[in-house]
Amino acid sequence: MARVNGKKIKERYHMLGQELAEAGIDIDQAKEKLKAFEVEVPSWVFGVFGGGRFGDYMPPAPARDFHAKIRDAAMVHKLTGASPRVAIHVGWDKPEEIAFEEVYVDHFAEPRDYAREQGIDFGAVNPTLFLTGTHYGSLSSPLPGVRRALIQHCEVCCRIAAKHAQGLVTYWLPDGSNYPGQRDLWQQEQLVREAFRQIYDSAPDTVVHLIEYKLFEPGTYSTVIADAGAAAAIADSLGDRAGVLVDMGHHPFGVNVAQIVARLVNTGRPGGFHFNTRYAADDDHSVEPNISMYAIFCELIKGAVVCAQDPARNWAYMIDQCSSLENRIRAVLHSIDSLQISLTKALILDRYRLEALQQRQDIILANRVFLDAFLTDVRPILQMARLEKDLPLDPVAAYDETGYQQKIEQERR
Ligand code: AFD
Ligand code: MN
Ligand code: MN
């Protein structure tokens, strides 16, 4: 496929290059940065999930074990060349091993080796804080036994991350309440802070901890870590190796996520992103190359935390979507494609011109320059990058040609 359209792609790329050069933008530089962009895929998107809706319907061929999730993630990387790591969910990926004890750490060596054989590696490690016994909360549970076990679980996850993954641990807590009066809000806050203190202090000092926030769910009245400010306050109290994880789906309507990103990047702390599209509530949808995604990438580039010269400065980028109706692998491929388009648009923004207009308070022209890049069809850049990396030009179409879907539908019946 790549060979057939190669000539046309080069022509289109050349034409766009000339156009952008007039504005002083180097298309080759944008293409090289795009090629360096990496995003992790979550193991859980490929697995068995459901909330009792639509009977037992699930998109065909969910992965029924950890190895199958790894193979699906590897397939995504094979087609995109952009997702060399899979984020894992300890206790969810291997439900038989919730990992409350040290002895579990090395149980993750085998699947990690398996991932490497498939051409990928382990990325972020997620403790699972929402399984059996957590219906009154996790790190703020009123039951000391539950709290103690989950703190240990997080400690084990930190060791797994340090020893068998990238040293990154990301936390999402289901802690909150459903009615006013149900819980002592002060106490919940206190317990969560104490638990994080303990986890942070006992973790190997190579580990980076990212704290995720979410407006609601499962709590409908209150949530302990409900917004970026709450997550940042906890991270601040812990130390330099703690930061905030933004998940697109976890904000109230109308919140400007690009502004949250700008603020967090400015703190210089570690940070990360769970990409998805939010329409009504939570995070179930694939990423689309819309204006918010573009604006977010503009901030990440300005802060030099994406495609940075020094990769250590990069934030951690992950996809977190659910895909409860659509084909999961296609949905994830679509998300990666959308992220690459959004990033490329942000890479060709005429920042000098924009800055000049901002200085003159030229409201409308500044907005038009900002939109110029968003409205540009950057697909020639993306296709050229794929051509050079010997990747399929359209990963979703290429997936359908691999026969993988038919194969897993047979195997996983
Ligand atoms: C939940 C949360 C959150 C988290 C994910 C994995 O909404 O997005 O990242 O589980 O723990 O769905
Ligand atoms: Mn998330
Ligand atoms: Mn979510």
Image: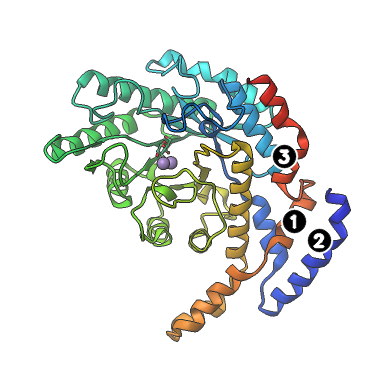
Element class at badge 2: helix
- In this rendering, does residue 74 appear at all? yes
Q: Is residue 358 left or right of residue 69?
A: left
Q: In what quadrant of the picture does the C terminus appear?
A: top right
For marks 1 and 2 on the same chain, the one whose residue lies earlier in the sequence: 2
* Disc 2: which residue: 9
Marks 3, 2: nearer the viewer: 3
Please state which amino acid type lies under the numbered disc 1.
Gln
Element class at badge 1: helix
Above or below 154: residue 193: below
Please state which amino acid type lies under the numbered disc 2.
Ile
* Disc 1: which residue: 383
Above or below 163: residue 29: below
Sort mark 3 into few (<14), some (14-19) or many (20+) by Cα contacts within 10 Å: some
Are the residues tagged 1 and 2 within 8 Å (C-beta)? yes
On the image, the x and y values in percent for residue 334 come to: 62, 47
* Disc 3: which residue: 399
Above or below 307: residue 365: below
Q: Nearer the viewer, residue 382 or 156?
A: 382
Are the residues tagged 3 and 2 within 8 Å (C-beta)? no
Are the residues tagged 1 and 3 within 8 Å (C-beta)? no
